[in-house]
Amino acid sequence: MARILTGIQSSGRQHLGNVLGAIKPAIKLANDDKNDAFLFIADLHSLTSIKDKFLRKENLLSTAAAWLACGLDPEKVVFYAQSDLPQCTELTWYLNCFTPYPMLANAHSFKDKANRLSDINAGLFDYPVLMASDILLYNANLVPVGKDQRQHLEMTRDIAEAFNRHVQKDILVIPEAKIDESVMTIPGTDGQKMSKSYGNVIDVFLPEKDLKKQVMSIVTDSIPLEDSKNPDLCNVVKIFKLIAPADEIAQMEKSYRTGGYGYGHAKAALFRVLLETFRSERLRFEELMQTPDEIYRALNMGAEKARYIADETLMKVKQSLGFR
Ligand code: ADP
Ligand code: TRP
């Protein structure tokens, strides 16, 4: 049985891109009885950018609620908040001392953020070591991540190998990245990749009125209603195709080509399909957000299970380093 572990940034509410591109596939993998799965909310990582305490609490709750609403079973999966296990920050220090400075200075994501952001803090620089600690603390074998995280996984392996070489063989388990190249990029309301940072999201957990507003804001061209249109070039169709039943997709494409069918019609159809597809997830999300104690109970249960392994690894690491 392989131990699968992955972290979820709690940098904002989870959108359709997160749901289809990350949440649903990870839950499928995690709920599989053949796997021993650890899924956690990387709330310490979010401190590199988010400084507001209310927003931090809100993001933890909405992120956890999205995962639970999409079917994560907290009895089966070890589901926890990173900040509930301080063992992770302690291990980060030990790992820091086995991490070459140039390796961090050359990280793509650091260089990219350093060029874009005004707040370039040391946490941002050390981000990959905290991530290595998340993984190595729990002896993970497989780490499912997006392509953008490939370099971070290579660093985790390098750090673990350096530690084992310098300190003691086989203390840390060397993990492997599991990168699914086939996961498609979900387009946002403007046709670019849907992302919190581009303000182009469809948030399927919003109240109906607000969700409708987002759907109506999808960018289209100005071809008149009665004219024929190319469905392949339309942002509404692109999103509709990701969730609608095959016969409805075929019908919409036909209507585009025939003419007499406007973007308003297509948006109304997309809105209806979003409500239908995510009916149970939306209800459950609302319920959970009304009863945060239920969310905290799930996270506490996960932290309890995670603590046992975290303590064991940390003790081994400390002893191997000669600390009391
Ligand atoms: P965002 O760009 O909104 O900040 P994150 O970078 O936090 O999203 O991504 C969290 C997870 O969701 C990652 O696994 C990422 O690959 C996935 N994801 C994010 N946006 C999309 C998208 N538009 N299409 C497919 N997957 C996505
Ligand atoms: N850095 C990851 C991301 O941005 C989130 C993350 C933090 C993570 N710690 C992790 C992913 C450990 C996998 C394993 O998506």
Image: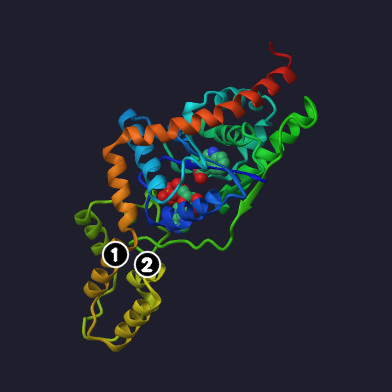
The answer to whether the residues at label 1 and label 2 have Cβ atoms under 8 Å apart is yes
**Percent x, y of residue 204:** 32, 55
Would residue 44 be found to the left or right of residue 207 on screen?
right
Amino acid at pointer 1: Ile
Of badges 1 and 2, nearer the viewer stands: 2
Residue at image location 29% in from the left, 64% down from the top: 218
Please give the label number shown on residue 239.
Answer: 2
Please give the label number shown on residue 99.
Answer: none
Tell which of 85 and 180 is nearer to you.
85
Residue 150 visible, this angle: yes
**Percent x, y of residue 217:** 25, 62
Above or below, 240 against 91 in this view is below
Residue linked to disc 1: 218
Sort mark 1 into few (<14), some (14-19) or many (20+) by Cα contacts within 10 Å.
many
Residue at image location 33% in from the left, 85% down from the top: 254
**Picture quarter with the C terminus:** top right
Above or below, 34 against 224 in this view is above
C-alpha distance separating marks 1 and 2 = 10 Å
